[in-house]
Image (cartoon, rainbow, N blue to C red):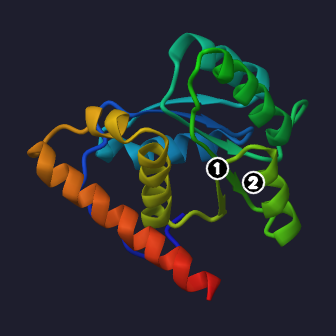
Amino acid sequence: MYSNNRFPSHSISLQGLRVLVVDNHVDSCDLIALLLQPYGVEVKTASLAKQALELLVHWRPNALVSEIALPEVDGFALVQSVRTLTGRWGKRVPMIAVTAHVTEEMRQRALSSGFDQWLTKPLDLDEFIAVLVRSVIDQSPSRAIGFLTGQSLSLNYANIFQVYKTQHDRSKSSQL
């Protein structure tokens, strides 16, 4: 899970952020939940798309992280159902695809089907946190500020902006 072989700093608080993790491998769900816990993130997990949709309706997460290769209903169909459902609420939930299927075709398919971001397994925790934060900030800056607690709000916002800027700079340099 730590491709950079170091544990990330917990310099930012994501207290109050609600993340729904969908993966048919329970260990993967549990590991992501465990990794997000030090940041104050509230995590619920589902192993099937049907369970994820039920949780989405009743729990209303701020973000969704899903494996693409799910049994019965895959991640592509799940993301479309989530987009339809949340569109009725006038809300857009950031969605991050997480998969071991590392091909450009799969990445393009995930993004064109409605995922906002794409990450490959094994996850780099620093990158995962940065992508999660960036997804929430991109979706709703005011909502992102609303779940920040712990240190002073300005310090948390500065830390999150730094994570966002670093991730943005990385993606720009990789496009060159």
Marker count (numbered):
2
- The crowd level at tag 1 (other Cα within 10 Å; few <14, some 14-19, many 20+) is some
Quarter-of-image position of residue 105: bottom right
Q: Which residue lies furthest to the bottom in this view?
A: 176
Above or below residue 170? Residue 113 is above
Residue in view at x 71 percent, y 42 percent: 25
Q: Which residue lies furthest to the left in this view?
A: 152
- The crowd level at tag 2 (other Cα within 10 Å; few <14, some 14-19, many 20+) is some
> Where is mark 1, residue-wise?
116
Q: State the residue in front, 173 or 1.
A: 173
Q: Residue furthest top?
A: 58
Q: Earlier in the sequence, mark 1 or mark 2?
A: 2
Residue in view at x 77 percent, y 27 percent: 49
Residue 121 visible (yes or no): yes
Secondary structure at numbered mark 2: helix
Q: In this view, does 114 lie to the left or right of 157?
A: right
Cβ atoms at labels 1 and 2 below 8 Å apart: yes
Secondary structure at numbered mark 1: loop
